[in-house]
């Protein structure tokens, strides 16, 4: 019997493309965010509202990741923003090479900000770097305030957390302790920016917009 | 679910090395940081399924989970962080930053 030391990075194929994407964003001076959440947290609604409300201030391009269909891309198209749909055909996350391909189809030069909407999944997408400048995690109040504690990876790795659907908290429709969710997320990630929002009513969105504008312009 | 993709990459890397060594691999060790979210059972299941019919069929996969490193801003010490106890072991402060997570690594392979 013989033992061989290999020490080979297993996801280096993905990391190679992620690095190329980092170079691409640096060279073009573009800010790119990777938006991750469970299915149904409201990522697409947040995006559509953000694009509409910032129409005169930020030019946003979108890469939509879904297992199947172009339903989300159609919703983004209605805003007039450029969008590329990726179908993963069963895969639970986007890979860096898919982003490299999608970037070729976006009018990158005309954009201030590129947002990737990852496949709805709170676990797998957090393990695959796409070359983005930062991750944004979305948690809707209907999912429960225990999610930062139960799914720590994505909260530890994200630059910002949007707590969505806060309109449901009024009248006690949903039991969600917003302070607990915030404090659990900050235990994992002291620097995380937290924005409680309702993409439906627009409540709290202004702070999120300021954060987006500051980051997109500082690059 | 992403374990299938990880398993495909592990299998390819082992088969690559097996071709170089011209020997049958019997066991392999991989390591990853805890933030890589690898489930051992799912990875072994996926690996077993795709290894059928290759020289890796029946290969024993050892998976080591490396602790997450953190840096305390208060007392400036680096430490392994426990998910159940999110504070600095030296000064009990919760003002820390997470340092990079260990990458997924194929460490070593045993050949017949």
Image (tube, helix red, strand yellow):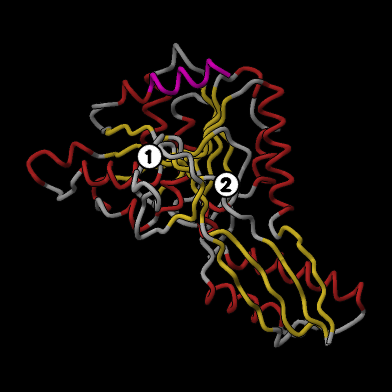
Q: Secondary structure at mark 1?
A: loop
Foreground: B105 or B66?
A: B66
| Neighbour tally class for label 2: few under 14, some 14-19, many 20 plus, Cα within 10 Å | few
The residue drawn where x is 58% and y is 79% is B45
Foreground: B18 or A87?
A: B18
First in residue order: circle 1 vs circle 2: 1
Residue A214 lies in the magenta-colored region:
yes
Q: Secondary structure of the magenta portion, mostly?
A: helix
Answer yes or no: do the residues labelled 1 and 2 have beta carbons within 8 Å? no
Residue A10 seen in the figure: yes
The answer to whether residue A76 is above or below residue B36 is above
Q: Which numbered dot is residue B95?
A: 1
The residue drawn where x is 76% and y is 62% is A7
Magenta extent: A209-219
Separation of residues labelled 1 and 2 (CA atoms): 17 Å
| Neighbour tally class for label 1: few under 14, some 14-19, many 20 plus, Cα within 10 Å | some
The residue drawn where x is 65% and y is 76% is B47
Residue B16 lies in the magenta-colored region:
no
Foreground: A161 or B33?
A: B33
**Residue corresponding to mark 2:** B100
Q: Which numbered dot is residue B21?
A: none
């Amino acid at each position: 019997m013989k033992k061989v030391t290999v020490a080979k990075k297993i996801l280096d194929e993905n990391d190679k493309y992620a690095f190329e994407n980092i170079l691409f964003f640096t060279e073009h001076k573009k800010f790119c965010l990777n938006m991750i959440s469970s299915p149904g947290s409201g990522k697409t609604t947040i995006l559509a509202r953000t694009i509409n409300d910032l129409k005169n201030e930020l030019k946003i391009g979108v890469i939509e990741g879904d297992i199947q269909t172009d339903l989300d891309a159609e919703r983004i198209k209605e805003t007039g923003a450029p969008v590329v749909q990726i179908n993963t055909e069963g895969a639970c996350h986007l890979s860096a090479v898919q982003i490299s391909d999608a970037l070729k189809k976006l009018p990158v030069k005309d954009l201030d900000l590129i947002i990737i909407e990852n496949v709805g999944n709170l676990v797998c997408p957090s393990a695959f770097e796409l070359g983005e400048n930062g991750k944004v995690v979305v948690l809707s109040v209907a999912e429960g305030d225990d999610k930062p504690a139960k799914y720590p990876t994505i909260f530890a790795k994200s630059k910002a957390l949007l707590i969505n659907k806060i309109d449901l908290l009024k009248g006690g429709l949903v039991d969600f302790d917003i302070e607990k969710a915030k404090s659990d997320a900050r235990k994992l990630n002291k620097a995380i920016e937290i924005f409680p929002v309702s993409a439906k009513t627009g409540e709290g969105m202004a702070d999120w917009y300021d954060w987006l504008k500051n980051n997109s312009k500082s690059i | 679910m992403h374990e299938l993709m990880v398993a495909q990459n592990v299998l390819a890397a082992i088969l690559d090395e097996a071709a170089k060594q011209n020997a049958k691999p019997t066991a392999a060790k991989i390591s990853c940081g805890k933030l890589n979210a690898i489930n051992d059972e799912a990875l072994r299941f996926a690996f077993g399924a795709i290894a059928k019919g290759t020289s890796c069929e029946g290969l024993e996969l050892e998976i080591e989970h490396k602790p997450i490193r953190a840096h305390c801003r208060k007392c400036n010490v680096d430490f392994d962080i426990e998910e159940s106890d999110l504070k600095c072991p030296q000064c009990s402060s919760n003002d820390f930053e997470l340092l990079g997570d260990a990458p997924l690594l194929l460490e070593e392979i045993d050949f017949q």
